[in-house]
Image: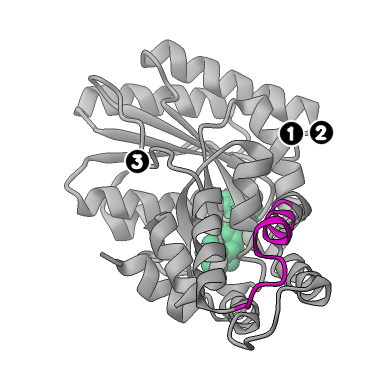
């Protein structure tokens, strides 16, 4: 069953799809799998941002198993299956608390799409009948709080906010209190953009995590790192470090609609060990999809 992700990806992923169509096109030329063919395939996989590691591995394997054979449908099916395999079989559902509110912390570099993704996730969960509280812990900019408040108003979920300059950890604390008092199902915590090299900001994130854990056992149950797909391999390099510091449990990969670098999906797993749990495929409130490897590969190859 191919769902909404596939449909949206077919529309939104056009730039990445063009590159993969070029890759799939190699298999219809009915040529031989010789050194020229393999080098061309390698070049195309790299330009689709598959990453050096996965590309080298795939091409070496084809050199071993398909050398001098005809580059036809069975090779295409093989490559498609390999790409699917690279995405792994992780549990991509949100880890929910055994009882009481589930807390989802969202972090990442500036402008990666955190606040928008939180709004989309809050909307998705609200549509599933869950009670959601969003916590506006990006207290650096008044505009950041406003942005989240506007979304919360549209979605009809609760928001906990404070004056700009308030300690983000105290907003996180209040959001947990409110969630417990109201019997909410999920708390989603927005944070200011930061780099893993900004020690004081990473300490601030640790403090938020500590406060969440004191308020609600096991919180945060998810620490989702937001990556902007348009940054391709650069985003992944940052994520390797960032993810370790915050103990990330999964990835939200945004802006897949506007980029030819969608192949980065394949190297995220290899480099960070983390599964993409959600994919952002547009700026609208419904443009977030639970990531499904099957649909993703199908959207690229079919
Ligand atoms: N096309 C597209 N745009 C997106 C997507 N997700 C976010 N954006 C846009 O990216 C821009 C930045 O999004 P924000 O959600 O404000 O990013 P942020 O990480 O909260 O930014 P800071 O709080 O400043 O660090 C906005 O213009 C969003 O509309 C997506 O999946 N597709
Ligand atoms: Mg933001």
Badge 2 crowding class, 10 Å Cα cut-off, few under 14, some 14 to 19, many 20 or more, is few
Q: Residue at x 56, y 78 (%)?
A: 17
Q: Is residue 210 visible?
A: yes
* Residues under numbered marks 1 and 3 in contact, where contact means CB atoms less than 8 Å apart: no
- In this rendering, the answer to whether 69 lies above or below 246 is below
Task: Tell me where residue 221 sits by quadrant.
Answer: top left
Q: CA distance from mark 3 to mark 2?
A: 30 Å
**Mark 1 vs 2, N-terminal side:** 2
Left or right, 286 with respect to 137, comes to left
**Mark 3 vs 2, N-terminal side:** 3
Q: CA distance from mark 1 to mark 2?
A: 9 Å
Extreme residue in the bottom direction: 29
- In this rendering, the answer to whether 272 lies above or below 252 is above
Q: Which residue is mark 1?
A: 241
| Colour scheme of the picture | one colour
Dot 2 falls on a residue whose secondary structure is loop
Q: Which residue is mark 2?
A: 197
Tell me residue 280's x, y (percent): 48, 61
Q: Is residue 59 magenta?
A: yes
Q: Is residue 79 magenta?
A: no
Q: Residue at x 73, y 72 (%)?
A: 41
* Residues under numbered marks 1 and 2 in contact, where contact means CB atoms less than 8 Å apart: yes
Q: Residue at x 48, y 70 (%)?
A: 282
Q: Which residues are magenta?
A: 57-71
Badge 1 crowding class, 10 Å Cα cut-off, few under 14, some 14 to 19, many 20 or more, is some
């Amino acid at each position: 069953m191919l769902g909404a992700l596939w449909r949206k990806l077919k529309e939104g992923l056009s730039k990445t799809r063009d590159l993969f169509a070029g890759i799939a096109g190699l298999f219809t030329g009915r040529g031989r799998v010789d050194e020229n063919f393999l080098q061309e395939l390698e070049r195309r996989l790299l330009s689709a941002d598959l990453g050096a590691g996965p590309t080298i591995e795939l091409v070496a394997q084809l050199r071993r198993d398909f050398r001098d054979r005809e580059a036809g449908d069975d090779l295409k099916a093989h490559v498609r299956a390999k790409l699917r395999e690279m995405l792994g079989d992780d549990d991509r559902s949100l880890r929910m608390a055994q009882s009481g509110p589930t807390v989802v912390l969202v972090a990442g570099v500036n402008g990666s799409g955190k606040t928008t993704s939180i709004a989309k996730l809050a909307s998705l969960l609200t549509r599933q009948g869950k009670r959601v509280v969003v916590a506006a812990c990006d207290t650096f900019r008044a505009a950041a709080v406003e942005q989240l408040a506007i979304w919360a108003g549209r979605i009809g979920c609760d928001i906990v906010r404070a004056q700009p300059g308030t300690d983000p950890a105290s907003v996180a604390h209040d959001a947990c209190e409110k969630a417990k008092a109201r019997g909410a199902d999920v708390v989603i915590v927005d944070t200011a953009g930061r780099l893993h090299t900004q020690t004081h900001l990473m300490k601030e994130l640790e403090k938020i995590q500590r406060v969440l854990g004191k308020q609600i056992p096991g919180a945060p149950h998810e620490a989702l790192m937001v990556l902007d797909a348009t940054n391709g391999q650069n985003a992944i390099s940052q994520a390797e470090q960032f993810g370790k510091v915050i103990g990330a449990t999964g990835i939200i990969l945004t802006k897949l609609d506007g980029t030819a670098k969608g192949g980065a999906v394949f190297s995220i797993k290899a480099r960070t060990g983390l599964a993409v749990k959600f994919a952002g495929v547009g700026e609208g409130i419904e443009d977030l999809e639970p990531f499904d490897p099957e649909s993703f590969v199908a959207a690229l190859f079919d």
